[in-house]
Image: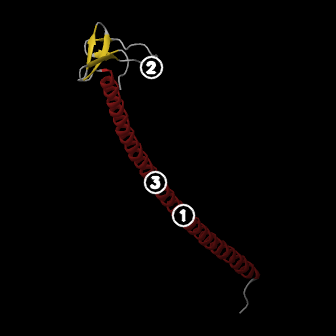
């Protein structure tokens, strides 16, 4: 049986249309698949970058925490050292003041008349046994006195 030419042309056109539609469907499928792969790649890359950023942030945070801890320890050591130095300085200052006080007492005592000395008419008199002599100062002049205190050191 012979198929008319219009049916043949119609079948060929239908076959071409079906092939075009099939090609278009396959193209859309491949494009969607490619877009999904690109989306998954972008998502994977974004997750990797996020993980790297978190790791870097944790590392930086750990570094900052370690630096802060070192600074706190250094500051505590500095405070401790300053406190120790201040305590040592205070102790030395007290020792100096005590030495100065002792020296002042010693000097003051060197101006006091001894048991064998007397102040008579404003002059220090030394008594040895039954003899009396004037106390002579560094300049060769008699040492002046008032009460039980001389104007120059006696010892």
Q: Residue at x 72, y 87 (%)?
A: 3
Q: CA distance from mark 2 to mark 3?
A: 66 Å
Looking at the image, how many numbered discs can be counted on the residues? 3
Q: Residue furthest front?
A: 130
Horizontal side of 140 relative to 110 (left or right) equals right
Which residue is label 2 attached to? Answer: 138
Q: Quadrant of residue 132?
A: top left
* Mark 1 vs 3, N-terminal side: 1
Toward the top, the furthest residue is 121
Question: Would you name the residue on which mark 3 appears?
Answer: 70
Q: How would you rate the neighbour count of disc 2 (Cα within 10 Å): few for under 14, some for 14-19, many for 20 or more?
A: few
Front residue of 57 and 145? 145
56 to 154, vertically: above or below? below
The residue drawn where x is 33% and y is 35% is 94
Check contact, mark 1 vs mark 3: CB within 8 A: no
Query: How far from the left and from the top, in percent, is residue 68?
Result: 45, 51
Quarter assignment of residue 40: bottom right
Q: Residues within 10 Å of mark 1 (few under 14, many from 20)?
A: few
Q: Please, is residue 144 above or below residue 20 in the view?
A: above
Label 1: element kind: helix
Q: CA distance from mark 1 to mark 2?
A: 92 Å
Q: Which residue is mark 1?
A: 52
Task: Give the mark nearest the N terminus, 2 or 3.
Answer: 3
Q: Position of residue 50 (x, y in %)?
A: 52, 61
Q: Callout 2: helix, strand or loop?
A: loop
**How much space separates mark 1 and mark 3, taking CA atoms?**
27 Å
- Please tell me whether residue 35 is drawn above or below residue 86 in the rendered image: below
The vertical placement of 12 against 140, above or below, is: below
Mark nearest the camera among 2 and 3 is: 2
Residue at 65% x, 76% y: name it: 22
Say whether disc 1 or disc 2 marks the residue closer to the N-terminus. Answer: 1
Q: Nearer the viewer, mark 1 or mark 3?
A: 3
């Amino acid at each position: 049986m012979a198929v008319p030419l219009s049916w043949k042309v119609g079948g060929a056109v239908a076959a071409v249309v079906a092939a075009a539609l099939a090609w278009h469907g396959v193209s859309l499928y491949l494009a969607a698949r490619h877009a999904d792969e690109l989306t998954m790649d972008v998502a994977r890359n974004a997750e990797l970058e996020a993980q790297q950023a978190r790791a870097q942030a944790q590392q930086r945070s750990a570094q900052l925490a370690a630096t802060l801890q070192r600074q706190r320890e250094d500051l505590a050591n500095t405070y401790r050292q300053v406190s120790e130095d201040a305590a040592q300085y205070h102790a030395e200052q007290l020792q100096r003041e005590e030495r100065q006080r002792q020296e002042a007492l010693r000097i003051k005592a060197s101006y006091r008349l001894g048991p064998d000395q007397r102040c008579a008419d404003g002059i220090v008199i030394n008594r040895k046994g039954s003899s009396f002599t004037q106390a002579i100062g560094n300049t060769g002049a008699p040492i002046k006195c008032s009460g039980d205190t001389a104007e120059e050191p006696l010892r």
